[in-house]
Amino acid sequence: MALPESLPLHGLSAIVTGAGRGLGRAEALELARLGASVVVNDFGQPGRDGSGSADATPAEAVAAEIRAAGGQAVAHLGDVADHEQAAALVQLAVDTYGKLDILVNNAGILRDRMIFSMSEDEWDSVIRVHLKGHFNTTHFASVHWRARSKEAGGPVYGRIINTSSEAFLAGSAGQPNYAAAKGGIVGLTTSTALALGKYGVTSNVICPRARTRMTEDVFAGFQEPGEGELDALAPEHVAPLVGYLASPAAANVNGQLLVVHGGIVAIVERPKVSAKFDTAKDAFSYEELDSLLTPHYADRPPNETFAAAEVLGLKHA
């Protein structure tokens, strides 16, 4: 039975990367529930570090679940960090549904290590999947939207929802590669928002907090819900925000960073200047900087960092 045409995403098509499990799966199901036709992308490797052979089973299972509920979905087995495979993913959406309207970038891996122990490969692999993967799909989607806009002679419908992390906001000692990639995704998102706005395309980024295969270690100390209780860290808490950002209702939301988890959505402002010092002469000297900056930081612990999560009141779930 087909879904009703009154749904907010009716007639729109979406790609969700990393949608075979966890957050991506919940997001794909939510977009489909809201009426979108979905391309479910997942490389299907069993290891959260990107190890193991590619497997179409996770993506196929989610696509089948969407179809069983009355929606439209196809699966795509592909590595979004591979430029050609990302191009094929966007083309699959266009060939299957006639156009692409929504891109949700979620695919990622973890290879955690302290900075002094991290290998070059552990750095490169995480940057490749997260940051290059976001770039690849965004690039080909933007080419599609720009061409459509030129053909239409005006704006078209386009939505990008990228996935960052609070590891970027507040730091994560054992994840320098992951935190750097997630910070890069924020920069990619805001740049894309400025570049594509005139074509009718919005680009936003979320920092989700959810209990998934990727975060099983992070939330190991958090109590899991009892039988019949709602898990505050369930991916299903994140998916509705993705559905909203993908919808026509979010037309004025562009270049924004939002933190989301169990019952909370926090809009993060751009960084602000917390203090300003002017030189008494034409240029600063070491001595003058010492007299101004050293007292300013005197009462702060030497290991204190930009604790955005604490400022937001979002340190604990």
Image (spheres, grey):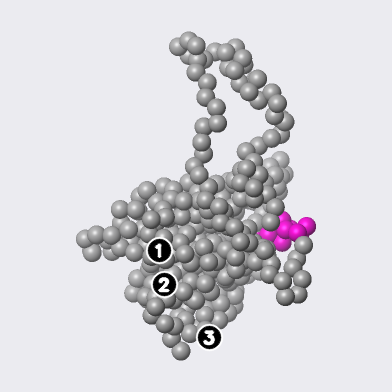
Q: Name the residue located 52 percent from the left edge and 80 percent from the top edge.
A: 66
Q: Percent from the top left, x then y, of residue 106?
A: 54, 62
- Tell me, yes or no, if residue 120 can be seen here: no
Q: Residues within 10 Å of mark 2 (few under 14, many from 20)?
A: some
Category of crowding for the residue at label 3, using alpha-carbon neighbours closer than 10 angstroms: few (below 14), some (14–19), many (at least 20)? few
317 lies above or below 243: above
Q: Quick one: SS at disc 1?
A: helix
Q: Is residue 87 left or right of residue 284?
A: left
Q: Which residue is mark 3?
A: 68
Residue under the image location 52 percent in, 51 percent down:
267
Q: Position of residue 14 (x, y in %)?
A: 44, 69
Q: Are marks 3 and 2 in contact (CB under 8 Å)?
A: no
**Mark pair 1, 2: CA separation:** 8 Å
Q: Which stretch is magenta?
A: 214-222
Q: Identify the image quadrant of residue 142.
A: bottom left
Q: Residue furthest bottom?
A: 1
Residue beneath the point at 62% across and 43% down: 311
Residue 279 sits above or below residue 22 on the image:
above
Badge number at residue 56: none
| Tag 2: amino acid | Pro
* Rendered-image quadrant of the C terminus: bottom right
- Magenta stretch: residue 220 in it? yes
User: Mark 1 or mark 2: which comes first in sequence?
Assistant: 2
Looking at numbered disc 1 in the image, what kind of residue is underneath it?
Ala
Q: Give the structural element (helix, strand or loop) at label 2.
A: loop
- The residue singled out by tag 1 in the image is 249
For label 3, the SS is helix
Q: Is residue 297 visible?
A: yes
Q: Which residue is mark 2?
A: 8
Q: Do the numbered discs 1 and 2 sit on residues whose CB atoms are within 8 Å?
A: yes
**In the image, residue 256 lies at what x, y percent?**
46, 51
Percent position of residue 132, x then y: 50, 54
